[in-house]
Amino acid sequence: MLQQYFIELGEGYGDIYELMELMETNQHRIHRTFIFSSNIKGGQAISLAVAFQPARNSNFMPIYICREGITQTGESKPKRRLLFEEASIACGQEPIYIGLKHSTEFADTKLFYQYITGILRLNHLVPPLQ
């Protein structure tokens, strides 16, 4: 049974560089890259995520995420988002942009990640629960 699990690296300040390193060293395993956006007062909170194919014969599909640590105000994209987009394209992936509810709208981050997983499955962006 293939299951997706979110692995939170941090909020995206220095953690984005770790995420990009994971992308580069595991380029052959990348399933998709994502840019999640949530509305906040004065702009948007941006999360960056990468879903990887399961390693070897496992049924574990990791989705590494830097959750809501990047704030975007106005039209110009923050540097870290641009770096992530460039890294995604360099790995052969066009990042998929998805608008979401902010994680503070959920009682627990587990519920927030279940919400995202449901959206990704319904839109056929990750494999269904088997």
Image (cartoon, rainbow, N blue to C red):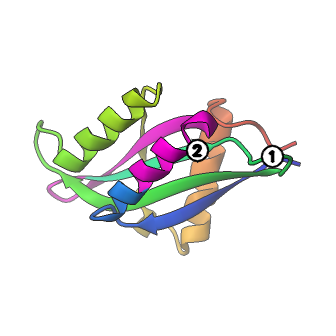
Residue 110 in percent (x, y) is at 61, 68
Residue 46 in percent (x, y) is at 32, 51
Q: Which mark is residue 51?
A: 2
Q: Is residue 29 magenta?
A: yes
User: With 91 as the anchor, is 76 left or right in this view?
Assistant: left
Q: Is residue 37 magenta?
A: yes
Helix, strand or loop under label 1? loop
**In the rendered image, which residue does mark 1 sit on?**
56
Magenta part of the chain: 19-44
Residue at left offset 77%, top offset 38%? 128
Using the image, determine if residue 110 lies above or below residue 71: below
Residue at left offset 53%, top offset 55%? 64
Q: Nearer the viewer, residue 9 or 100?
A: 9
Residue at left offset 57%, top offset 63%? 7
Helix, strand or loop under label 2? strand
Query: What amino acid is labelled 1 in the image?
Result: Arg
Q: Nearer the viewer, residue 130 or 119?
A: 130
Residue 66 in percent (x, y) is at 41, 59
